[in-house]
Image (cartoon, grey):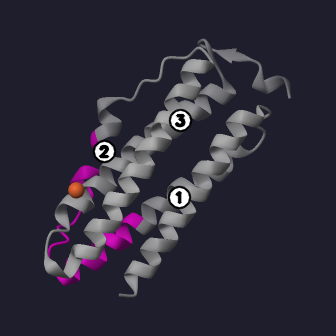
Amino acid sequence: MMAWVLEVNGQTATTVKLQETLEDLVSLDRLVRQVHWNARGTATYSLHELTGEFHADLDSQQDIFAEQLSILGVDPVVSFEKLTQNVHAVPNANQKHMRKAGIDLLIKHYQQMINQVKERMKGIDDLVVEDHFIGLRAMLELQQWKLKLEQEI
Ligand SMILES: [Fe+2]
């Protein structure tokens, strides 16, 4: 367990994981938000509503991870690059065939983030931080499941 108390540039392995997860959350939130804004036709109203609901939960999770970093003495910082990296990839979901492309894209990104969260949870010896990761994983899996239901409409 020594690895978890070693500091690298003022950060511990745990704060690096929190920081990376905060950046991924911001990036995923931008993607969800763009799909939300693109889903504005009658065929995509339910997707618009769903992604609006997801954004609120993703925003709360960003706050939890950012403030946990502050508690551990590290400034939460998200780069401009992270804020914009997914936005270009979002199809305009206004029409029905593009709606499917938007949902598929989100499901793929949710899976990537779920995999990363599962990997980062390994070896965390701080129960509060572990609890944050468990809560985040549960939220991501629930949202991805709702997207899969939306895919069938
Ligand atoms: Fe909205």
Q: Answer whether labels 1 and 2 touch (C-beta < 8 Å).
A: no
- List x then y, in percent, for residue 131: 70, 42
Task: Give the residues in magenta.
Answer: 84-106
- List x then y, in percent, for residue 52: 31, 59
The quadrant holding residue 53 is bottom left
Query: Mark 3 or mark 2, which has the lower sequence index?
Result: 3
Can you tell me whether the CB of the residue at mark 1 lies under 8 Å from the nearest atom of ligand 1? Answer: no
Quickly name the residue at label 2: 85
Of the residues shown, which amino acid type is indicated by label 3? Answer: Ile
Q: Badge 1 local density, few (<14 within 10 Å), some, or many (20+)? A: many
Quarter of the picture containing the C terminus is bottom left
**Residue 101 is one of the magenta-drawn residues:** yes
Nearer to us: label 3 or label 2: 3
Quarter of the picture containing the N terminus is top right
Query: Mark 1 or mark 2, which has the lower sequence index?
Result: 2
- In the image: residue 71, left or right of residue 101: right
For this rendering, which residue is in front, 81 or 124?
Answer: 124
Q: Answer whether labels 3 and 1 touch (C-beta < 8 Å).
A: no
Q: How far separated are the C-alphas under marks 3 and 2?
A: 22 Å
Give the number of the disc on residue 64.
3
Nearer to us: label 1 or label 2: 1
- In the image: residue 62, left or right of residue 30: right
For the residue labelled by badge 2, is the local secondary structure a helix, a strand or a loop? loop
Give the number of the disc on residue 69.
none
Q: Quadrant of ligand 1?
A: bottom left
Of the residues shown, which amino acid type is indicated by label 1? Answer: Leu
Question: Residue at position x 27%, y 42% from top?
Answer: 84
Query: Mark 3 or mark 1, which has the lower sequence index?
Result: 3
For the residue labelled by badge 3, is the local secondary structure a helix, a strand or a loop? helix
**Residue 2 is one of the magenta-drawn residues:** no
Quickly name the residue at label 1: 140
- List x then y, in percent, for residue 106: 38, 64
